[in-house]
Image (cartoon, rainbow, N blue to C red):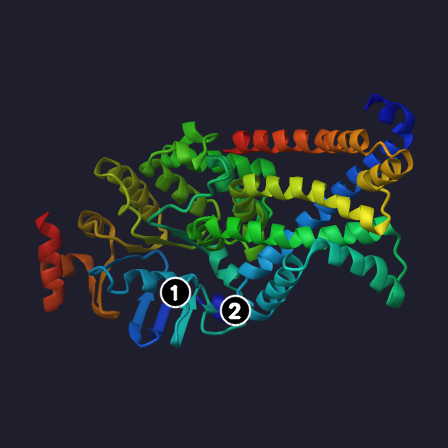
Amino acid sequence: MINVFTQHWQELLVGFGNTLLCSVIALFFSLIIGSTFAIFEVLPYKLLHIIGRIYIEVFRNIPLLVIGMFFYIVVPQFIVTLDGFTAGTIGLTLYTSSFIAETVRAGIQAVDDGQMEGARANGLTFMQAMWHIILPQAFRYVIPPLGNQFINLVKNSSVLAFVAGFDLMYQGDTIASTTFDTFNTYIVVGILYLIITLPLSYYMRYLEKKLA
Amino acid sequence: MIALKEEKEMAMIEFKNVQKYYDKFHALNNINLKVDKGEVVVVVGPSGSGKSTLIRTINGLEDFTEGQLLVNGYDLADKKTDLNQIRKDVGMVFQHFNLYDNKTVLENIMLAPKLVLKRDPKENEEMAMRLLKTVGVADKAGSYPRQLSGGQKQRVAIARSLAMKPKALLFDEPTSALDPEMIDDVLNVMKKIAKEGMTMVVVTHEMGFAREVADRVIFIDNGQILEDEKADIFFKAPKEKRAQQFLSKIIKH
């Protein structure tokens, strides 16, 4: 195990860095996109409602691998060239954002109607009420399920391995197939994933306690 | 619109033949009601009579099907009317307070003046503290709503409405969710505001308050205004039979 690490630390570090980068980018954008579609779903405009619904159902119900492959193979053929990392990260963002949208929508709907009513009667616009009153409370409700989404996101970033995204899983595969030391390699890769996901998991739990 | 606003003798709130249906249910039946500047009007009636619906149409929380409603010169039947313009000038106090749970008491009061009126932060805080003193909750400025009693919450809610420097205040059963010993604290604050000349529409079952403060009492049943009387006359000799029955039931307690 130590051998794998000492001999291949450069490749592993590249993979670790790419996995971390992909996760951070996907987390940031899926949170924004997901929250936007969640708001679409609670707005009184039917068209936005339908758009939100279609978006969520499409990306939530197609395997991540299919979405990733689409951006890696199909999109470059017809629209714009994307490297594996970009294609995989876009796929992961869209996929995760559909789950986050559902989670955040449930959070928004869990906030008492009186909060919005009080804010509107107080003179705030819908968006001001959403931003200052409803969303902060909604996020407090959904920190536990959101934490699960974030951890899933980090693990799902291994889809990059299939689109040559040079992430941790991809680098691990390469090392394993050249050294044939599959056992130790995948254990090291697993440990490196834990280094990202465990602190994340504890941080979410800490947030949950702090904001409760 | 501007011409209307500048008219001197204009009523603060004026319903003209307002109708509201929820599907087949006739929630507001031909409402005609005028509330002048500085007037305190108390709305009473049995539960389900349309009191809340009536008061909630005034700031556009409920819409209506037909008729005309002018509030502070704005026409609520006109789809182009910006409801936020009305809400800036017409505050509302709710039965269940509706304080912002994620904000402290002070933040609750300062938020709308900051966002809507762009009030200078220092001035905003000074005014908020002054209002909290007026309603007797200054020591709770840094607390969250969940740490307050119902009576304190309602007084903070009143301060929050006052911070917008409203031209009128709507109260929708402000004491109905309170423990009995808290009610007077809230009513006293409301009396103080009334004496300072605020235009008020109050839905309440507190007949003592109505008798003492109201200029007029509106009795409403089945979505219809059955009486619109000066307070002393209403309490001495209500004309309508349903109003008599209602009063006898409520005053017994």
Which of the two discs, 1 and 2, sits closer to the camera? 1
Where residue A181 appears, as percent x and y from the top left, is 84, 31
Asked if the residues shown at circle 1 and circle 2 are in contact, with their CB atoms under 8 angstroms apart, the answer is no
Crowdedness of circle 2 by 10 Å Cα count: few (<14), some, many (20+)? Answer: few
**What is the chain identity of the residue bearing mark 2?**
B
* Label 1: element kind: helix
Answer left or right for A21 relative to A118: right
> Do the residues at discs 1 and 2 belong to one chain?
yes
Q: Is residue A84 above or below residue B146?
A: below
Residue linked to disc 2 = B81
Identify the residue shown where x is 56% and y is 43%.
A145
Identify the residue shown where x is 61% and y is 66%.
A48
The residue under label 1 is which amino acid type?
Answer: Thr
Res. B57 mark: 1
Identify the residue shown where x is 44% and y is 51%.
A118
Count of numbered circles in the view: 2
Residue positioned most to the front: A180
Res. A65 mark: none
Where residue A26 appears, as percent x and y from the top left, is 74, 46
Answer left or right for A189 relative to B143: right
- Please indicate, yes or no, whether residue B165 appears anywhere in the rendered image: no
* Label 2: element kind: loop
Closer-to-camera residue (B79/A43): A43
Mark 1 vs 2, N-terminal side = 1
